[in-house]
Amino acid sequence: MTSASTPRDLRAELETLTTEAFRPELAEIDQLPTLDIARLMNGEDASVPTAVASRLPEIAAAIDAVAQRMARGGRLVYAGAGTAGRLGVLDASECPPTFNTAPDQVVGLIAGGPEAMVTSVEGAEDSADLARADLDALALTPRDTVVGVSASGRTPYAIGAVEHARTRGALTIGLSCNPGSALAAAAEHGIEIVVGPELLTGSTRLKAGTAQKLVLNMLSTITMIRLGKTYGNLMVDVRASNDKLRARSRRIVALATGAADADIERALTEADGEVKTAILVLLADLDGPTATGLLADADGHLRAALKSAGD
């Protein structure tokens, strides 16, 4: 819908969405004991993974397409409004410490900008023009991916982002929680996780929000696995930016190598604190610069660097 839509038009459209459906059997939920409400809510949440599971082939295809572009230097950009936008910003913000990505490698755009993370920005989600401006500021290329995120699948900001990204040759993904959504139709990869009506009518921060979080976790995490950011299930590209992460770095090196503490400290010093490099130093008996060079030649894939060191 555009800004020219009337309130009656919008109300009629919302009434067709499963995420907005009213559930009369829950009309007196406010009169139930707290434990009963908690059980109801927990039961609702338990249905979300099943809804995600039914769309795993589409999710996997999208991830492979993202990874191919990011391997060539592309970026992953999330664009959404409200809860959907906040979830995208959250996922993007967690990639640098977890996978040592550059700050601009995974980007979260939210309608209304940073202020919208903590407060509602009037009318921002209704502006496709705002989405185009936000994307133009990133100077999109065909190597980039833009993921429009919207529970309803009708949010103009998310749809506008996907449509504009396609004109720039970027890969596009539309993630929504309603079938036959305009957002999925606008994207090359449409992912519709249909979780049904919410416990509280229209409160899509609940099941829809959980579903979107699960899919965004997959998009970023599995893409990073494909890019060699892990070794087995170890986060070997973790950025040791605080005491907890420094301790985690030492533990990851220990789990990957079985080395003694003194050897781990020496390897991390040789590797300038880089976990992946320290593991290669220990497993291949290399010095830091040689290990760094082998990893660069292997595009950061530790298994490939280990194989190269053994050849």
Image (spheres, helix red, strand yellow):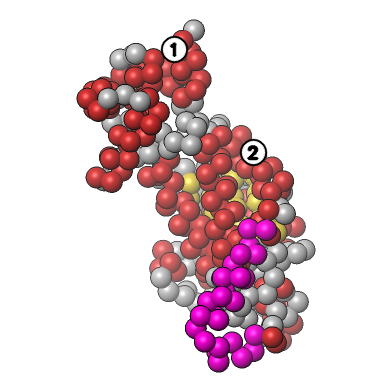
Residue denoted by label 1: 309
Whole-Å distance between the Cαs marked 1 and 2? 28 Å
Residue shown at 65%/51% (left/top)? 173
- Decide: is 89 above or below 112: above
- Indicate the quadrant where residue 45 lies: bottom right
Q: Amino acid at mark 2?
A: Asp
Q: Secondary structure at mark 1?
A: helix
Q: Characterize the magenta stretch by its predominant secondary structure.
A: helix
Q: In the figure, residue 198 lies in which quadrant?
A: bottom right
Few, some or many residues within 10 Å of mark 2 (<14, 14–19, 20+): some
**What secondary structure is marked by label 2?**
helix
> From the viewer's perspective, is 225 left or right of 261?
right
- Tell me residue 48's x, y (percent): 63, 62
Mark 2 and mark 1 in contact (Cβ < 8 Å)? Answer: no
For mark 2, what is the residue? 64
* Residue sitting at x 56%, y 40%: 223
Horizontal placement of 17 versus 39: left or right? right
Residues in magenta, as a range: 26-50
Examine the rendered structure and indicate whether residue 228 appears above or below residue 304.
below
Give percent across and percent down for residue 228: 50, 31
- Residue 89 vertical position relative to residue 38 in the rendered view, above or below: above
